[in-house]
Structures are given as structure tokens and as C-alpha cells.
């Protein structure tokens, strides 16, 4: 009986690994022995070709994660060069007496007030809507039911290099955010325009509400696309080694509460918008769980960073409160006199040295 079942399993794997007759989706899925990335060219909430390439690329993630843990470096980065740059950065931090901040840098209620103020300033010409998220195409949804076994058969018979990853019917958006790939597989079509607007700001002066406002106007009030466009611009290449030299990164105000401005400001920005976006389209419990998982992953790969934990968690809180504001339509209410919008909290570490962060700029 055992031999019969084993023979049937092998036969099934052989069948599913044979050339497909199910159309273009499987042809895209089988078009390469080793998975390659794909770049979505135009805005499309459903993209069968992108889904096929994404599933193959996701098969590489477990192996790359193991390599990251063993070698102490991120996947997709030049390992030796990154180690050298990280060592240089750490020596500079030590020389400057850098210490990770231990206080919350953002008042979320005040940031919600600021976003509300922006929304009201453009209403009724632009009215906020939640928007639809990028999702699996119908072809991909059907394939998810048996895709692991299909790719396993192809791997066993050496028709694809990677051992397949079980996707557990997770949403496309969740997987893209987890891997930092939204800018490849979920474009909005407004990324270039947003980048051009960002570049008009002086270095270090672009605040969170500026990013929200510019993207909100470009996306005509679609909140999902507003947050996603910002995420795509900020995390277009999350594994870039010399990311501090990225012209966009130079425009960003420093969000963290560290003793000196040498922490991972890049990660702070794209984590906040990414997790905030996910919280806007998901329930609070799910988004908060994602934030905690992200913090745990960063702890394993990078080490403890209290400021990054705060950014992740407060990004989820921001998204949850923003979603409630949309649902309850409280964005229509003008700000009361006691509703403040100066959401960037003073940094105690700088205040102790006779310095203090300025409040968020009005616009």
C-alpha cells in the first residue's frame, strides 16, 4: 500500500512537471530555470505575468534568509562590501558617542490631525477614498490551490532550481511588503511624479505630512495608492548599500530620537509608510502583528533597535486610526482649537545637549 501511494505521488509530480497546456500563466511560470525578478510597467491591480514571476521569486526567499542568518548579511546585497561599510559606520557612531533613542518620536494623534487638515484643504476638489489593493489575478488564485506541488515536481525533475515555498494563500500585498518588492510588482504609476516633487524640497526638510500631501494630490485622494506610492519611492531598492547617497533619502527629515542623527532614518521612513498602508487596508490586530514580526525580523538580522520598534508599531497605530477616520468620516470635521498638528515630539537626547528638534513644518 505504501509503495502504491509513493508511486502515485511520483506519477502526480511527474504529470504536473510536464509542459503545461493551461495557457500563458504557466508559460511565464516555467519560462526560467532560476527565478528572475520582474518589473511591472504600468498600474494594474491584477497582473498574471507578475504573479507568475513573483511566485517563482518567492521560492528563493527561505534559502536567502538562511544565508542572511549564517553570513550575517541581507540577501541581495554585496556581502563583503556591506560588511566593510557597516564596520565604518559603527566606528563613526562610536566616535560620535551614538546611542539609540529610547523615546517615542511621533505623536500619532497629532499626525492624524495634520493629515485631516491636508484632506480638508483639498476638499471638495479631492475626496478621500480607501481604494483597492493589489491582489492575485484569477489565474494565480487557481494556481495557489496546487502550485506548491507543481513547482515541487519541477524542482525534483530539475526543471526549476529553487525548492518551492508554501504560500499558504497569503495575500499578494502581505508577501510584497514582507520582501520589500512593492516597487517591482505593485506600481501606482505616480512614482516618478512623486520623486520629482520630493526633489523640490531642501535637504533634510521633507516631513511625513509633506510626503503624504504630495502623494495624496497625485493619487486624487486614493489613500491606498497614496501610501503605496510613498512606499515605492522610499523603498525602491531596500538592499542598496550606499543608500545614504540616494538623492531622495537626502531630502528626508530625521525621524528618530537618537543622540546624533546617525540611525537608520531610511528604514524608519519606508517602514512607517509600508506598515501604515497595510494597517489602513487591514484590521488593527493583523497590522499590529505584522509590525511585531517586522521588528522581530530586524532584531534577528540587525540587532536590537528601539527606535525601529517604535516606528513599526506606531506605523500600525497610525494606519488603524487613519482607517477609522475614513470609516467614521471624521476627516470632514474642522480641527478644533485644542487639536495640535505638531506631531514630531522633542528629542530628549538633543534637548539635553542644548538642542531641540523643531516642530513639524506647517504647509
Image (cartoon, grey):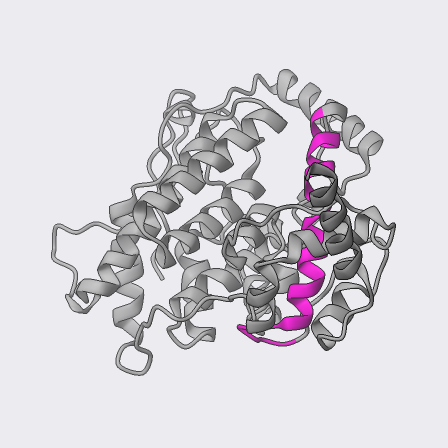
Name the spot of residue 209 as percent of width and height, x first.
39, 56
- Does residue 358 appear left or right of residue 154 in this picture? left
Q: Is residue 343 visible?
A: no
> Which range of residues does the magenta coloring cover?
42-69
- Give the main secondary structure of the magenta stretch: helix
- Counting labels gives 0
Residue 65 seen from this side:
yes
Q: Is residue 88 above or below residue 198?
A: above
Q: For residue 55: magenta?
A: yes
Q: Which of the two residues, 291 or 99, is positioned nearer the viewer here?
A: 291
Image height of 265 relative to 348, above or below = below
Q: Relative to residue 283, is residue 302 drawn left or right?
A: right
What residue appears at the point 82 percent right and 68 percent down from the top-left corner? 19
- Viewer-nearest residue: 223 or 39: 39
Q: Give the residue furthest to the left.
A: 337
Residue depicted at x 58% and y 31%: 262
Image point (36%, 62%), residue name: 363
- The residue lying toward the viewer, choosing from 50 and 149, is 149
Residue 64 lies in quadrant? top right
Which corner quadrant holds the N terminus?
top right
Residue 352 located left or right of residue 154: left
Task: Give how far across and how far down residue 310 sits, in percent.
Answer: 40, 33
Q: Quadrant of residue 77?
A: top right
Check the image and name the residue furthest to the front: 1
319 over 219 or under it: above or below: above
Residue at image coords 55%, 71%: 188
> Where residue 42 sits in the image (x, y, percent)?
63, 76
The percent position of residue 356, horizontal first and vertical second, equals: 38, 32
Amino acid at each position: 500500500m505504501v509503495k502504491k501511494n509513493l508511486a502515485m505521488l511520483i506519477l502526480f509530480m511527474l504529470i504536473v512537471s510536464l509542459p503545461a497546456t493551461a495557457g500563458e500563466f504557466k508559460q511565464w511560470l516555467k519560462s526560467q530555470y532560476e527565478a528572475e525578478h520582474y518589473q511591472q510597467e504600468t498600474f494594474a491591480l491584477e497582473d498574471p505575468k507578475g504573479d507568475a514571476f513573483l511566485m517563482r521569486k518567492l521560492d528563493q526567499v527561505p534559502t536567502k534568509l538562511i544565508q542572511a542568518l549564517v553570513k550575517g548579511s541581507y540577501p541581495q546585497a554585496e556581502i563583503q562590501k556591506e560588511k566593510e561599510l557597516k564596520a565604518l559606520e559603527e566606528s563613526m557612531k562610536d566616535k560620535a558617542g551614538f546611542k539609540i533613542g529610547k523615546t517615542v518620536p511621533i505623536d500619532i494623534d497629532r499626525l492624524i490631525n495634520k493629515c485631516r487638515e491636508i484632506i480638508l484643504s483639498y476638499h471638495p476638489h479631492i475626496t478621500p477614498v480607501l481604494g483597492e489593493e493589489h491582489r492575485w489575478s484569477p489565474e494565480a488564485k487557481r494556481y495557489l490551490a496546487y502550485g506548491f506541488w507543481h513547482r515541487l515536481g519541477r524542482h525534483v525533475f530539475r526543471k526549476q532550481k529553487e525548492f518551492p515555498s508554501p504560500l499558504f494563500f497569503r495575500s499578494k500585498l502581505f508577501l510584497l511588503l514582507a520582501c520589500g518588492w512593492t516597487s517591482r510588482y505593485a506600481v501606482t504609476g505616480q512614482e516618478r511624479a512623486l520623486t520629482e516633487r520630493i526633489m523640490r524640497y531642501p535637504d533634510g526638510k521633507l516631513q511625513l505630512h509633506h510626503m503624504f500631501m504630495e502623494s495624496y494630490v497625485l493619487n486624487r485622494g486614493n489613500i491606498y495608492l497614496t501610501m503605496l506610492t510613498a512606499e515605492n519611492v522610499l523603498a525602491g531598492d531596500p538592499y542598496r548599500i550606499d543608500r545614504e547617497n540616494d538623492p531622495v533619502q537626502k531630502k528626508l527629515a530625521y525621524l528618530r530620537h537618537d543622540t546624533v542623527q546617525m540611525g537608520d532614518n531610511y528604514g524608519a521612513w519606508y517602514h512607517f509608510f509600508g506598515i501604515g498602508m497595510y494597517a489602513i487596508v487591514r484590521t488593527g490586530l493583523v497590522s499590529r502583528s505584522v509590525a511585531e514580526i517586522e521588528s522581530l525580523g530586524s532584531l534577528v538580522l540587525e540587532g536590537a533597535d528601539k527606535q525601529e520598534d517604535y516606528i513599526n508599531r506606531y506605523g500600525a497605530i497610525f494606519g488603524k486610526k487613519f482607517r477609522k477616520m475614513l470609516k467614521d468620516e471624521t476627516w470632514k470635521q474642522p480641527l478644533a482649537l485644542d487639536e495640535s498638528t505638531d506631531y514630531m515630539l522633542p528629542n530628549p537626547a538633543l534637548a539635553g545637549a542644548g538642542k531641540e528638534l523643531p516642530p513639524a513644518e506647517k504647509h
